Image (spheres, helix red, strand yellow):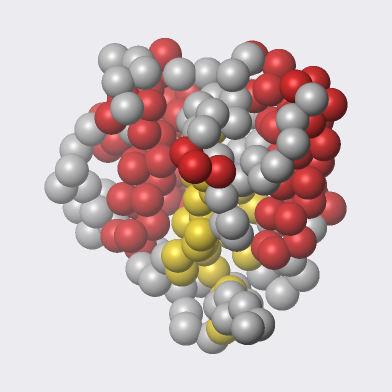
Amino acid sequence: MSRTARLIPHYGYLHVMSRGNNRQRIFSYARDYRFYCSCLRRLKVEESVKIHHYCLMPNHLHLLLGVGPASNVGRFMQRLGLKYFYYYRARRDYIGHLLQGRFKSKIIVDEKYFLRCGKYIELNPVRAQLVSSPEEYAYSSYRHYAFGWKDEIVDDDFFYLSLHNDATRRKELYSDMLFDDKTCAEQLHIDSSNLMFNNELVG
């Protein structure tokens, strides 16, 4: 039976997740994370994909992607998976599937979902009790947004840039926002009219 076509918006945002086969670890050493990050930096440019938020967990990963007409999310994820698989296999003499099937993706339909998704992604290490605070985790977009650390993987999201004109105040507001479950676009007084939330899809 042929696979069901995946729905991808022409313009918009996606929450993408990929997991290790049988929930096995896919990142065990710092060099593993670093290699995957280098692939993210290069392939997002080659496939015209923006990465607004990310987190690499030991046995899975989350990405919040921005896409446009030139984006090819399927090829982006396929190339990521293959490059990492060849890297992993070469260092561990590994045989078999590394990732659990195709990546999962959800279309982000409005600004509230966008905000909650970014927060969910960056709080993953805390919920998993890997760290007590998101700033302690090296392999996510949190430090970029909360502290201004340079991260070539991250494309600043619209909401973050709209928090405040002053960069220092913007970082403070972002850090506060992450722990406020009631935060939404209206409460932050963010004008989201320029965001691309629509239902125009491609297979």
Image vertical order of residue 96 relative to residue 89, above or below: below
Residue placed at 47% from the left, 39% from the top?
23
**Residue 107: horizontal and vertical position, in percent?**
46, 68
Q: In this view, does 37 lie to the left or right of 173?
A: right
Image location of residue 181, percent across then percent down: 18, 43
Where does residue 13 sit, x and y in percent of width and height?
52, 63
The single residue placed furthest to the left in the displayed view is 182
Instruction: Give the residue at x 84% y 26%.
Output: 90
Task: Decide if residue 36 is in sight here.
Answer: yes
Quadrant that contains the C terminus = bottom right
Q: Which residue occupies 26% across, 49% down?
A: 188
- Quarter-of-image position of residue 75: bottom right
**Residue at point 37% right, 50% down?**
117
Reply above or below: 5 against 24.
Answer: below
**165 or 116: nearer the viewer:** 116
Could one spot residue 63 in this view of the protein?
no
Q: Is residue 51 above or below residue 37?
A: below
Task: Locate the N terminus by quadrant.
Answer: bottom right
User: Is residue 126 or residue 165 the one in the foreground?
Assistant: 126
Q: Is 158 placed left or right of 41 in the picture? A: left
Q: Which of 125 and 186 is in front in this view?
A: 125
How many numbered marks does the figure carry? 0
Q: In this view, does 25 lie to the left or right of 85?
A: left
- Residues 166 and 95: in front is 95
